[in-house]
Amino acid sequence: MIGIFDSGVGGLTVVKEIKKELPDVPIIYFGDTARLPYGNKSAETIQKFSVEIVDFLENKGCKTIVIACNSASALAADYLREKYSNLEIYDVVSSGAEAAAESTEKKKVGVIGTAATINSGVYEKKISEIDLEIKVFTKACPLFVPLVEENWIKRPETKKIARTYLRELKLNKIDTLLLGCTHYPLLEKVISGVMGRRTRVIASGSKLAGKLHEKFRDQAGKGKDKYYVSDLTPHFKTLASRILGKNTEIEKAEI
Ligand code: DGL
């Protein structure tokens, strides 16, 4: 049983990739919708919330945990690994850094994410651990999450905002842009359109799903996928079915 968590709905973009690779391995998802967003919170707060969620998932029988939130990966992954040495913990930042390093030919990578993720400097650190020669250019794009939440994906305003956010990254002539936030894959078309053909726009979900595939490929598990949130609204249900492409049963859970 794989436990996957995010601050809210965005982690479902990661679930989608994992289910493509491992359709028969059951997952438990927790979205902390009552306390979203994480992207503007302190490390201390994000660590505290993450511990509560991992306890919840562990109690449900998960031995493998996926942090499907870049902000929590950036600020709580090391903390969680130290605290839960009995669990195997995967995170989207490590996978994203690997995917970006593999993708870049010119050794120029751009990373966009929430303020918490970008200000943590985690991507520069992780990518330089893989290849010191790769130059990393980052940009926080805090308006992208609410634009996705409002489903303003095809609005001209969103394209304008994307142009403003991405201008400098374009000038830096990056050949790879990593979407370092779980909501951003939903804006992939807009972002790719702004960046142009010479920039490969990538997300971390498929890399992470590939790693899990290595571990779980022969282990069809018992049990049904379960989806929990800390606050359940019709809005969340709509967003969730938009991302997963089907109606999904979601329960509210106290943690
Ligand atoms: N899931 C968060 C992330 O990937 C974005 C939403 C939030 O700020 O909570 O950083």
Image (cartoon, rainbow, N blue to C red):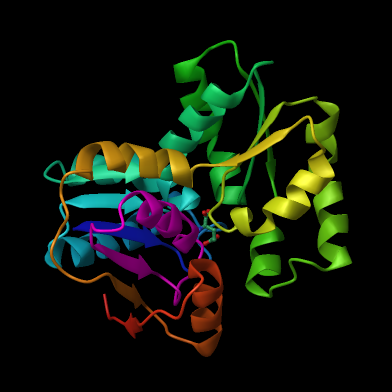
Is residue 17 highlighted in magenta? Answer: yes
Q: At 47% across and 68% down in the image, what residue appears?
A: 8
Q: At 33% across and 37% down in the image, what residue appears?
A: 211
Compared across the picture, whether 242 is left or right of 139 comes to left
Compared across the picture, whether 117 is left or right of 166 comes to left
Q: Nearer the viewer, residue 6 or 202?
A: 202
Q: Residue furthest top?
A: 133
Is residue 187 highlighted in magenta? Answer: no
Q: Nearer the viewer, residue 237 or 233?
A: 237
In the rendered image, residue 46, in percent from the top left (x then y), is placed at 41, 56
Residue 205 vs 32, above or below: the answer is above
Residue 140 vs 24, above or below: the answer is above
Compared across the picture, whether 80 is left or right of 201 comes to left
In the rendered image, residue 79, in percent from the top left (x then y), is placed at 29, 43
> Dividing the picture into quarters, in which one does residue 195 lie?
top right
In the rendered image, residue 104, in percent from the top left (x then y), is placed at 62, 22
- In this picture, which residue range is highlighted in magenta? 9-35
Q: At 49% across and 82% down in the image, what residue appears?
A: 237
Q: At 80% across and 24% down in the image, what residue appears?
A: 173
In the rendered image, residue 167, in percent from the top left (x then y), is placed at 85, 39
Residue 149 vs 39, above or below: the answer is below
Residue 233 vs 60, above or below: the answer is below
Give the quadrant of the C terminus: bottom left
> Dividing the picture into quarters, in which one does residue 172 lie?
top right
